[in-house]
Amino acid sequence: MNTQLPTFEFILKNYKNFNARATRDALISYWQHSEKGGKMFWAVAGAMSSAQLGIVLAPAIRAGLIHGMSVTGANLEESLFRLVAHDSYKDFPDYRYFTKEDDTKILENRMRRVTDTSIPEDEAFRVVEKQIVPTWIKATEEGTRKFWHEYFYDLIQSIEKEKHQGKAEECWLLAAAEHNIPMVVPGYEDSTFGNIFASHVKHGECSASIAKSGVEYLGELYDQYQELAKDPAGVGFFQIGGGIAGDFPICVVPSLKYDMEVADVKPWSYFCQISDSTTSYGSYSGATPNEKITWDKLTQDTPMFVIESDATIVAPLMLTALLEAKANPQAANELITKYSA
């Protein structure tokens, strides 16, 4: 066993078939794409921040393994919550056996359950609300307009370290803000703070126009994608879950080609989706990657992988292995050769 790359070697040695095989192949392809200088764009749906994916996602951003992101508004704000209110979260490992009355008690205790953990209303939502609402009001007064994530980039970098309850090195939003990586947050209106923002707009305290729209996000992504794609290896697409977090950014390629009429648009050069959505009729989250060929989002030559599993298990394994390979590239390539024989 290579002590410098234990996770990387473990996957290469043991993951031979089924979803394990898909994980191994996706890992090797991701690493080789990175080795060639390729960029990787991540789409993160679900509640991965509440599941503390930042523990490994933040180091991956800092290591240059992730170059752009599309996230739900929930994932964006919940990364911030984990930083400022981590000690007030409560876990419920027996949630499968809860009654409606049990969940009502959780509500009355001002906790908001997300599967087996819960976000504290007062320590998370209300604390952050007191900090971000004044920035919205100020932007309204000054006529300033920003993208949704930019308000959170500014806020998370302004919080004093003494007020951190979670570990800064495990906060992916902080890592993304510090590196100012390109980001889109499609459909942010359905998040908690999207709702809070809407209420302040309705009350007349803020102007809806201070938060740039989804259309403007796509317009910005046109430029960001082409910048990321300048390297000959291009840009890969790594997707957790489905829905708008994935569908919105992957559309940038056909939109550049057909709507913007840009010549020689470079296609996505890699695709991997981790999802436990069952392939079914009319499902986007459960659609196989080759369906995307017909929409000109992928091509027949794009390396495509679907890992039908739990992203909270698979993503940390893959990112840990990639971080090991990044630190020991020669050893990683030697292991690939060894286990490919």
Image (cartoon, rainbow, N blue to C red):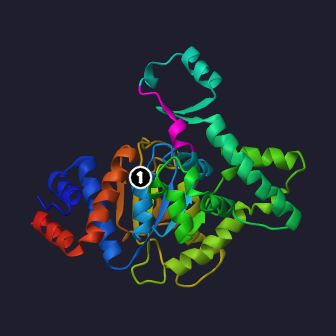
Tell me if residue 292 comes above or below residue 164 in the rendering: below
Residue closer to the observer: 155 or 296: 155
Tell me if residue 238 comes above or below residue 100 in the rendering: below
List x then y, in percent, for residue 71.
56, 56
Per the rendered image, the range of residues in magenta is 85-93
Q: Secondary structure at mark 1?
A: helix
Residue 318: name its quadrant. Answer: bottom left
Q: What is the three-letter code of the residue carrying label 1?
A: Ile
Residue 279: name its quadrant. Answer: top left
Quick check: is 259 in the magenta stretch? no
Residue closer to the observer: 240 or 195: 195
List x then y, in percent, for residue 322.
31, 63
Quick check: is 90 in the magenta stretch? yes
Dot 1 corresponds to which residue? 55
- Residue 231 visible in the current orientation: yes
Q: Quadrant of the C terminus?
A: bottom left
List x then y, in percent, for residue 72.
59, 52
User: Image check: 60 left or right of 87?
Assistant: left
Residue for point 47% across, 49% down:
241
- Residue 190 visible in the current orientation: no
Tell me if residue 324 comes above or below residue 95 in the rendering: below
Number of residues whose C-alpha sits closer than 10 Å to that of mark 1, classed few (under 14), some (14–19) or many (20 or more): some
List x then y, in percent, for residue 201.
84, 50
Question: Exactly how many numbered labels are in the figure?
Answer: 1
